């Protein structure tokens, strides 16, 4: 009975979700910017792991030169192989999981390339990144090929989209955030000269920015609550509940206990600061002891 | 001083001219990925790009395979094999990189500080960086600190050996006298080069879009996760490393004072000669007073064991102190934020 359903084969096919590391995205975009003169799109190999039952994690990629003319497409197989060998010696755990291309939609040549990758891995995924911003927005699509079957007979196969999302680890996020801040507020030319050395990331400045962001959020919540109380806007029950929950989440600690804990850890920290200063002095002395005074 | 007199040397003509590093977003992400997948091991890789005027552009990178120390036998043949594999790997990679129009000029290397709380200054580091700087002109080493990055602040810094130190390293003179002679102290062994992050417009578009996604905005944003106080601060471990280093330094200091005491008669005499020569040289307007005495003193001191390690320790400890101060001040701020929250109730 189930064999009547032509889509069943596609369902069985496996890959249901694809996660892409932001580094892969950057790599593809860089490859696109460095494409050979005259070519309109670039392709490359995706490396990663199949995790769990149905999910593919793409953690790395490398470009592969290719040529397209009319209905013919040539992928540099030798390059693909040697580059894969090289990658393998660095990260032995990464396998070929598919391929990427830039563009808006897969075309006839995509089918041929997909077939090639089908020989290197079981269920290749095809990641399509819109590097030309056809739709005036960034776009990430992922395809797998599924076969229409009736009983055991293959009829044809098609590209079917699978959900894809960019998966950033905690460290990735930090990196992205640092990059993002440069995007929105590039240092003005005058500041550039002044802040010559202090341009690198600084914990305290970051913390200040975080606290400011928090205050900003609290302020906007405050105005929202005020306007609901005064009846200007209608309250949203779910927002209200969430706020109550959050407020209830702030632990009430006995004042004395808290003050003691606060005092203790504050003393510890000040001690560390003092110790650091002391060490610095000590180091200066050590330096002096190791030197000859040649300024006569 | 020597370098300016001998402009024929590659080092003297070349690498002083870069004053900043322009780091592509792609390289940042590549280094982060490579380092975090191999924690707590220390990883290294090659940096590619080009130097444009005073700016060193780093546009791409590739990782070096881990050299398993277990496969390295005690004999030199095994090590030689590994070296050969390594250079073969680099060569193949360069060919591949060239084929896809990636910049193929080596502009340095990167290293993660593994789990050692941001410390990287070792003999091996100095040797590697020296051979880079000796062979190529404009090279830096990016040092990546995964612990710092994990807690919310991107920890990438660019370092290189100072020009004066390269001169010293060439002569392999590391006695305390040599350090004074070259006018070197621990803070001038390496120098930091400021980094600027750069992205292509296309990357910017994608990054801006990513920050509108739920993964990176609202309660998942890095800005707010940085405020977390639950996590164990790296403060304690940094202190531990510092105390260890201090102990080693202390031992070295003892050795040094022992050396000075046991050689004081000889060296003291030579030193007095030098002082006298300098004084009389000044009166006679001599260009280079006491040069002979200086050489004699240098000879006498050449029996001294190298002091480079002590100097490196001092530098490293200074970096730890910097870090400790920054970490504890950060905690103080957080504590105070919690305090004001509690006091309101």
Image (spheres, grey):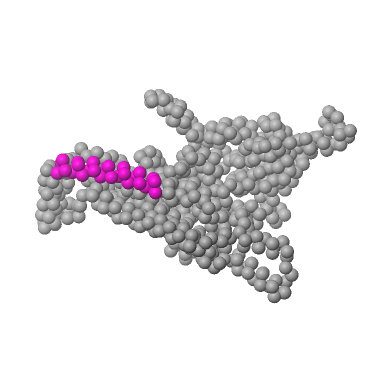
In this view, the residue in front, A243 or B234, is A243
Residue B82 pos. (x, y %): 45, 29
In this view, the residue in front, A36 or B36, is B36
Up-down relation of residue A273 to residue B267 (above or below): below
| Quarter of the picture holding the N terminus of chain A | top right
| Residue displayed at 27% across by 42% down | B251
Q: Position of residue B180 (x, y in %)?
A: 24, 49
The quarter of the rendered structure image containing the C terminus of chain A is: bottom left
Up the image or down, A196 lies above or below A153; here it is: below
First to last magenta residue range: B239-264
Q: Position of residue A227 (x, y in %)?
A: 68, 73
Residue B305 shown left or right of residue A181 in the figure: left
In this rendering, position of residue A43 left or right of residue A278 = right
Magenta segment's dominant SS is: helix
The residue sitting at 11% across, 45% down in the picture is: B269
Place residue A159 in its image quadrant.
top right
Left or right? Give the position of A32 relative to B14.
right
Residue B262 colored magenta? Answer: yes
Identify which residue, A177 or B88, lies in the foreground: A177
Residue A98 visible in the snapshot? no
Residue at figure coordinates x 43%, y 63% from the top left:
A194
Please indicate, yes or no, whether residue A90 appears anywhere in the rendered image: yes
How many marks the image carries: the answer is: 0
In magenta segment, residue A111: no
Residue B328 position within the rendered picture, expressed as x and y whole percent measured from the top left = 43, 56
Q: Residue at x 41, y 45 (%)?
A: B119
């Amino acid at each position: 009975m189930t064999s009547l359903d032509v889509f069943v084969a596609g369902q069985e096919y496996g890959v249901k979700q694809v996660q892409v590391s932001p580094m892969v995205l950057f790599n593809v975009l860089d490859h696109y910017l460095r494409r050979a003169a005259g070519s309109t799109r670039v392709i490359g190999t995706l490396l990663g792991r199949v995790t769990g039952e149905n999910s593919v994690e793409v953690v790395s990629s490398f470009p592969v030169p290719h040529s397209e003319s009319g209905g013919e497409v040539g992928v540099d197989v030798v390059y693909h192989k040697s580059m894969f060998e090289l990658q393998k010696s660095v990260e032995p755990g990464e396998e070929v999981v598919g391929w990427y291309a830039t563009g808006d939609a897969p075309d006839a040549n995509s089918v041929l390339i997909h077939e090639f990758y089908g020989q290197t891995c079981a269920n290749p995924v095809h990641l399509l990144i819109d590097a030309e911003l056809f739709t005036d927005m960034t776009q990430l699509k992922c395809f797998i090929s599924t076969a229409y079957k009736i009983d055991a007979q293959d009829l044809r196969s098609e590209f079917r989209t699978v959900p894809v999302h960019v998966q950033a680890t905690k460290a990735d996020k930090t990196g992205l955030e640092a990059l993002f801040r440069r995007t929105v507020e590039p240092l003005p030319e005058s500041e550039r000269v002044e802040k010559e050395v202090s341009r690198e990331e600084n914990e305290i400045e970051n913390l200040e920015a975080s606290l400011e962001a928090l205050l900003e959020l609290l302020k906007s919540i405050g105005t929202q609550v005020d306007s609901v109380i005064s009846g200007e806007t209608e309250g949203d029950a779910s927002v209200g509940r969430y706020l109550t929950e959050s407020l209830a989440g702030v632990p009430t600690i006995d004042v004395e206990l808290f003050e003691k804990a606060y005092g203790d850890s504050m003393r510890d920290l000040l001690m560390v600061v003092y110790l650091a200063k002391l060490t610095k002095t000590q180091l200066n002395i050590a330096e002096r002891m190791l030197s000859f005074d040649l300024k006569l | 001083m020597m370098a300016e007199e001998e402009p024929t040397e590659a080092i003297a003509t070349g690498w002083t001219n870069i004053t900043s590093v322009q780091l592509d977003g792609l390289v940042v992400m590549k280094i982060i990925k490579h380092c975090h997948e191999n924690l707590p091991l220390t990883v290294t890789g090659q940096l590619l790009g080009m130097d444009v005027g005073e700016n060193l552009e780093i546009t791409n990178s590739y990782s070096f395979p881990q050299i398993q120390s277990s496969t390295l036998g005690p004999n030199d043949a095994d090590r030689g094999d590994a070296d050969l594999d390594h250079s073969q790997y680099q060569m193949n990679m360069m060919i591949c990189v060239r084929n896809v129009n990636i910049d193929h000029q080596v502009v340095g290397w990167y290293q993660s500080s593994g789990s050692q709380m941001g410390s990287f200054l070792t003999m091996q580091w100095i040797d590697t960086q020296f051979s880079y700087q000796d062979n190529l002109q404009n090279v830096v080493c990016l040092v990546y600190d995964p612990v710092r990055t994990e807690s919310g602040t991107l920890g990438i810094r660019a370092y290189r050996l100072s020009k004066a130190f390269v001169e010293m390293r060439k002569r392999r003179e590391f006695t305390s006298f040599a350090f004074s002679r070259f006018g070197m102290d621990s803070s001038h062994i390496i120098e930091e080069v400021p980094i600027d992050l750069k992205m292509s417009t296309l990357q910017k578009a994608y990054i801006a879009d990513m920050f509108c996604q739920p993964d990176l905005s609202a309660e998942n944003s890095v800005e707010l996760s940085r405020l977390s106080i639950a996590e164990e601060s790296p403060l304690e471990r940094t202190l531990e490393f510092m105390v260890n280093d201090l102990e080693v330094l202390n031992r070295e200091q003892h050795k040094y004072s022992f050396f000075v005491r046991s050689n004081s008669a000889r060296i003291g005499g030579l030193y007095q000669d030098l002082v006298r020569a300098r004084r009389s040289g000044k009166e006679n307007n001599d260009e280079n007073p006491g040069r002979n005495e200086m050489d004699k003193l240098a000879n006498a001191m050449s029996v001294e064991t190298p002091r480079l390690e002590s100097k490196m320790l001092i530098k490293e400890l200074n970096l730890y102190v910097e870090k400790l101060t920054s970490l504890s001040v950060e905690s103080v701020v957080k504590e105070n934020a919690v305090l004001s929250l509690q006091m309101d109730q």
